[in-house]
Amino acid sequence: MIKAVCHCQSVVLEIHTESLVQVHCHCKDCQRAHGAAYVSSSIYPAAAVRQICGELVEFILERTPRLRCAQCGMHMYSELSAINLRSVNAYALPDGAFQPQFHVQCQDAVHPLADQLPHYKAFPASFGGSDEMMEW
């Protein structure tokens, strides 16, 4: 079990399983919701992520509920309810808990990135994508 904690430490999530995948997402929705070039997320089965304290405020962008701490505003997770998953903000996880495996939706990237991870134009085949890689 690990805990995800917001900046002000009022919201705490308990996560009771290993992540299914850890990614950097470059989609337009993530960019708009976070005001960032990409978002780092750790994906878990929804039932494995429980809020144990604090107050969350929900806002919806393009049908995806996103929950933030009511006090400091830090994004804690997004509900991927169609596939029964929760996408937890990597920056809320303990140090060392986030080990990204690849980048997704790179066709929407604001700028090229030079790291050693795979950069998928959309998604890998294992997630319903084409496996097409981005050529920077």
Image (cartoon, helix red, strand yellow):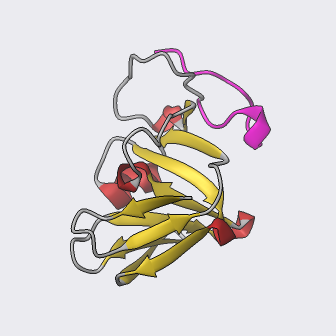
- Residue 18 placement (x, y as % from top left): 64, 50
Depth check: 105 or 46 in front? 46
Q: Quadrant of residue 48?
A: bottom right
Q: Quick check: 121 above or below 26?
A: above
Tell me: 20 left or right of 91. Answer: right
Depth check: 38 or 110 in front? 38
- Residue 132 placement (x, y as % from top left): 68, 24
Q: Quick check: 106 above or below 75?
A: above
Residue found 40% across the figure and 65% down from its top: 76
Q: Quick check: 12 above or below 118?
A: below
Indicate yes or no whether the magenta region holds residue 134. yes
Indicate yes or no whether the magenta region holds residue 9. no
Residue found 62% across the figure and 36% down from its top: 122
- Residue 11 placement (x, y as % from top left): 35, 74
For the record, the magenta segment spans 121-136
Residue found 74% across the figure and 42% down from its top: 127
Residue found 30% across the figure and 47% down from its top: 36
Depth check: 79 or 72 in front? 72
